[in-house]
Image: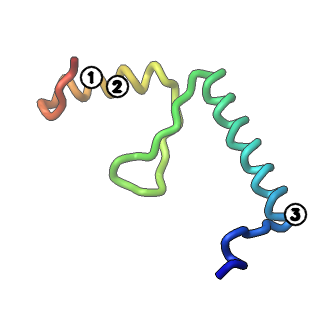
Amino acid sequence: MEMFSNPILSKSIYERAHYEQQLIEQIRNDLKSFDLILRRTHDHQNVFYLGDRKLFEKLSNEFMLQTDLFEID
């Protein structure tokens, strides 16, 4: 059991993880700088919405006001 307590990652796995971390950071920065929003849709697990943040907030607020399912503070 001792051999599993301190796993040693291979160099290629470490490099891949570092690359993916940088990629995610760049995507987050781009979304923020262009004021975009990326969200998974409610009805499909692997379908995403990418769009303008302000428009998304406007449409979602209108939807919540039209339906009585949500309570807005």
Q: Nearer the viewer, mark 3 or mark 2?
A: 3
Q: Toward which corner of the image does residue 59 lie, by quadrant?
A: top left
Residue 24 location (% of width, % of height): 68, 42
Q: Which residue is mark 2?
A: 59
Specify the amino acid type for callout 2.
Answer: Leu
Specify the amino acid type for callout 1.
Answer: Glu
Q: Which residue is mark 3?
A: 11
SS at badge 3: helix
Please report contact status of discs 3 and 1: CB closer than 8 Å, yes or no: no
Rendered image: mark on residue 62: 1
Specify the amino acid type for callout 3.
Answer: Lys
> Mark 3 or mark 1, which has the lower sequence index?
3
> Mark 3 or mark 2, which has the lower sequence index?
3
Residue situated in front as seen by the camera: 16 or 11:
11
Residue situated in front as seen by the camera: 72 or 13:
13
The quarter of the picture where the N terminus appears is bottom right
Q: Residues within 10 Å of mark 3 (few under 14, many from 20)?
A: few
Colouring convention used in this rendered image of the protein = rainbow
Residue found farthest to the left: 68
Residue 32 location (% of width, % of height): 61, 24
Residue name at image x 79 percent, y 68 percent: 8
SS at badge 1: helix
